Image (cartoon, rainbow, N blue to C red):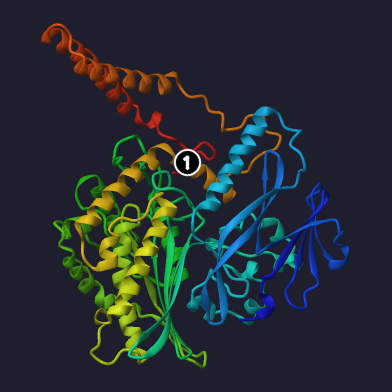
Amino acid sequence: MAAAAGAYENLKLHITPERFYVEACDDGANDVLSIDRVSTEVTLTVKKDIPPSAVTRQIYGILGTIRLVAGTYLIVITKKRKVGEFFNHVVWKATDFDILSYKKTMLHLTDIQLQDNKVFLSMISHVLSVDGFYFSTTYDLTHTLQRLANTSPEFQEMSLLERADPRFVWNGHLLREFAAQPEIHRFATPVMHGFIIMHSCSINGKYFDWILISRRSCFRAGVRYYVRGIDSEGHAANFVETEQIVHYNGSKASFVQTRGSIPFFWSQRPNLKYKPKPQISKTVNHMDGFQRHFDSQIISYGKQIIVNLVNQKGSEKPLEQTFSKMVNSLGNGMVRYVAFDFHKECSHMRWDRLQILMDQLAEQQDELSYFLVDSDGKVVMQQEGTFRSNCMDCLDRTNVIQSLLARRSLQAQLQRLGVLHVGQRIEEQAEFEKLYKNAWADNANACAKQYAGTGALKTDYTRTGKRTQWGLLMDGWNSLIRYYKNNFSDGFRQDAIDLFLGNYSVDEVDSLSPLHVQKDWKFLALPIIMVVAFSMCIICLLMAGDTWTETLAYVVFWGSASFGTLAIILYNGKDFVDAPRLVQKEKMD
């Protein structure tokens, strides 16, 4: 890796009323970034230009800039934690951020604008509070080992910002103004969102590094029920690329898998029901987006083996049938389709039946192989394609299958590298097996929190290899929290992501903000009526009337009033949920 292309690691922020100065404190660096707080112009200057009166603080990276109602804001990384080392490159997790206003006062804003600005700021803070932002100032985290091995010398000369994979740079929009000025690229740190874990492991007294990286795509990003399927460009919702890496004696092996929403146009809007019914769009040409999706997957990864884990009966059945039909119509030899009804096959805690799917995929997995480069940097093997797994959310079921496929690949890699002896199995290495399972369960939790708002389900199986009663209880609790969030706070979460990624731009002069959508009277009145009626029903039960008939009449009246209003609320469920306001998702579905 060319060190010249790295970003500055040690930075100091100097603040004066007129400017922000960002000083590079790496050895031998003399660069200072000067940001004009009035004109927003960004230029390079030198250390002697920093006024001694400036207020100084340590920062660890510039996330970028964003325009809100009050003007432009600078977002910086204020705390970081070392995750580990990646072939002598340090990988950091950004754990705290600061959002600094260019404007020194808010007096130019009306009360409504102040309120809106506050809401937009809370949206940015919300995105930054979701765990999982990672960066390195010397290594390109957005690419797999195989992509990095197949690059040109020109690529090595580029800055980290220029050469990063735009799918996985979460601050790409925030850095757009920096991107236009190559001379300041060393101040720009591309940040990925997802999960990274690194372990130094030992089997048979042989030490190796084991690394798991999940990169979340920022195209069609969002929350569970508001972002499903694909967009017209063929970008799938909840698309995550997961790479497992082994580093032993200078040799590196890597196995890549992807997950992503079922790639045609469908939606599943929350409507207060526990599981809203998925709707497949009847008005659009699905094949167009479907083909775009797989064309881009084949360019990025090679052969595609689809592992569709949704139910083959009930409300998920039409999605499975449509997916199967569309792969047949596509008629592309590079795309294969495997359907496995996870819930039916593994019902009644029969999780050993996952072996049926593993056996079914074994030959195809050997054909796809994995990427291997020896200690001299010579590429020995290339991975010829990826498994593209999905369930409905591409979280719980998907993660279980991915961890099993990754373990099978790891078995082959460790044998090839000489860490495992002939006939030895990973499952028998108790210490490593525990570490492996916990890491994959942590990966599941990170991906689930980022998409569904709570930890993953079924992680007891991933952690222990068994389904437990306690695990079922925890799944119930997580499902309840998911239900609440998906219905009553996901609109805000979706808006926050759209604002952060630049799908919505705040217009400083726009007086009509989409945040002020007037709610219908029934939105307030019906829940109040329901609560009052239900309370009266309970009171009548506790304070019995003179005769039992009188009590019964009261209870029946108030009971039917509360159930009646509940029925009306559920019937109009879509009006009662917290829906996104910034980007009209219906237009995008």
| Residue occupying the point 17% across, 67% down | 352
Front residue of 207 and 34: 207
Q: How many marks?
A: 1
Above or below, comparing residue 246 to residue 250 in the picture: above
Q: Is residue 393 visible?
A: yes
Extreme residue toward the left, this view: 548
Seen in the image, is 367 located left or right of residue 311?
right
- Give x and y (percent) for residue 553: 17, 10
Above or below, comparing residue 553 to residue 36 in the picture: above
Q: Quadrant of the C terminus?
A: top left
Above or below, comparing residue 271 to residue 413 in the picture: above
Q: Secondary structure at mark 1?
A: helix
- Give x and y (percent) for residue 413: 35, 84
Q: Quadrant of residue 557?
A: top left
Seen in the image, is 141 located left or right of residue 207?
right
Q: Quadrant of the N terminus?
A: bottom right
Front residue of 585 and 40: 40
Seen in the image, is 265 located left or right of residue 561?
right
- Give x and y (percent) for residue 209: 44, 81
| Residue occupying the point 41% across, 53% down | 449
Q: Dot 1 corresponds to which residue?
A: 585
Q: Is residue 237 visible?
A: no
| Residue occupying the point 42% across, 23% down | 523
- Give x and y (percent) for residue 311: 22, 53
Seen in the image, is 88 located left or right of residue 466?
right
Type of the residue with mark 1: Lys
